[in-house]
Image (cartoon, rainbow, N blue to C red):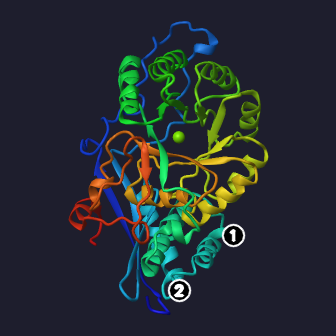
Amino acid sequence: MPATARIAAVEAFVLAGDKDYVGGAGLRATAPGQASSGSSPGAHRPRALAEIGDLHICAYPPQAQTCLVRITADDDTVGWGEGHAPLGPRATRAVVEDVLAPLLLGADPLAIEALWERMYGAMRLRGHVAGYQLEAIAGADIALWDLAGKLLGEPVYRLLGGPFRRELPAYASGVPGATAEERAAAAQGFVAEGYTAVKCSIGRGDIASDLATVAAIAEAIRGRADLLVDAHGAYSAENALQVGRRLQELGVYWLEDPLPPEDIAGYAHLTAALDMAVAAGETECTRWQFAERLARRAVDVILPDICRAGGITEGRRIATVASLHNTKWAAHVSMGSSVHVAAAAHLAAASANFLIFEFPSTPNPLGDDLLTAPLRPTDGVFRVPDGPGLGIAFDEDRLRAHLRDGAL
Ligand SMILES: [Mg+2]
């Protein structure tokens, strides 16, 4: 590498993929709400078995979408990053190109901590300390780490001081099916593939049927895999503890997002009342946001999404803050592209208090089919790429086919 490499270009690209995509590993996705059986409107139901509302449910676009960031050095070395952008990826692209790029152009690409502070500080006093701003920073930061690794000829996990491990335990995220029986069979299928943990969603309508579904899945995999349950912030003070105790009786390993994320006192109460782990944090964007939850013992396992939470640089700081509270972190990946998967994997490899890696069980149209080599778990274990930078390379024709609003 030249002794004085400089950043020559910062670009962002919107990617979209058809959700009906059926390639790759796993089973077809179940649309939100589809997995919950309906209840009869107007019928009297005991209070604890009432339907919960769905105002908390995230909006889902018709296509899988994200925003990739490409940073090029003046010797033409390229780094790729990703800002998590399931909705409105053109907004993320605008933040990268209009707000961040002018701060980065001409700078030393290895001064990553300094550049992170420059990007965060640019809008901090204007209140842009989460959301699109941090997702855009995440994309730029990950691109800088990939670029640094390629300039230095080392995988990112080595630049971070790792590895502690290169084989990451992964869980199959999402148990598809229209009935409890179908979902139990799908969970058994993931265990047969080698997964030792499976995560199912609840919280989209009827508590009684949710509990029956969890019971069926738990029974199907008992003794062979851990069951994680994601409630998507569905419950309230009135029913969260009751649902939690029922799930605990079923042997659930962690209950994720039982309450809306703003109710930190509620999380502290639940965490104290349940023996089962309470997991949360996919909503949080910085170490300061995680610090309050951790200090108040409002969470047992944190779930940072590094393409939302400021990238690898801030993700490493979040892991350090968690270590102050003897707390482990699990990588939240959701339907991120393979850049997201690779970036989270490198941080996990280099982090003492990493717990487990999320991998979507359903085909991802922006997944490793866009790469020149597969990037997915085998036998329930995710092996961290070993090449320079993030250790992945795009098949440019396949990448181009998913680009929206722009050209490579
Ligand atoms: Mg979740």
Q: Position of residue 117 (x, y in %)?
A: 64, 74
Above/below status of 364 relative to 393 = above
Q: Which mark is residue 87?
A: none
Identify the amino acid type marked 1: Leu
Q: Position of residue 216 (x, y in %)?
A: 46, 17
Nearest the viewer among 25 and 34 is 25
Q: Residue at 47% across / 52% down in the picture? A: 167
Q: Position of residue 359 (x, y in %)?
A: 43, 45
Nearest the viewer among 75 and 42 is 75
Dividing the picture into quadrants, the one containing residue 31 is top left
Sequence-wise first label, 1 or 2: 2
Identify the amino acid type marked 2: Asp
Above/below status of 85 relative to 397 = above
SS for dot 2: loop
Nearest the viewer among 328 and 338 is 328
Q: Which mark is residue 108?
A: 2
Q: Residue at 52% across / 29% down in the picture? A: 227
Q: How far apart are the alpha carbons under marks 1 and 2?
A: 25 Å
In the image, is the residue at mark 2 within 8 Å of ligand 1 by its beta carbon? no
Q: Which residue is mark 1?
A: 125
SS for dot 1: loop
Is any atom of residue 202 visible in this view?
yes
On the picture, is 379 further left or further right than 355?
A: left
On the picture, is 272 further left or further right than 384?
A: right
Q: Residue at 44% across / 68% down in the picture? A: 94
Is any atom of residue 34 visible in this view?
no
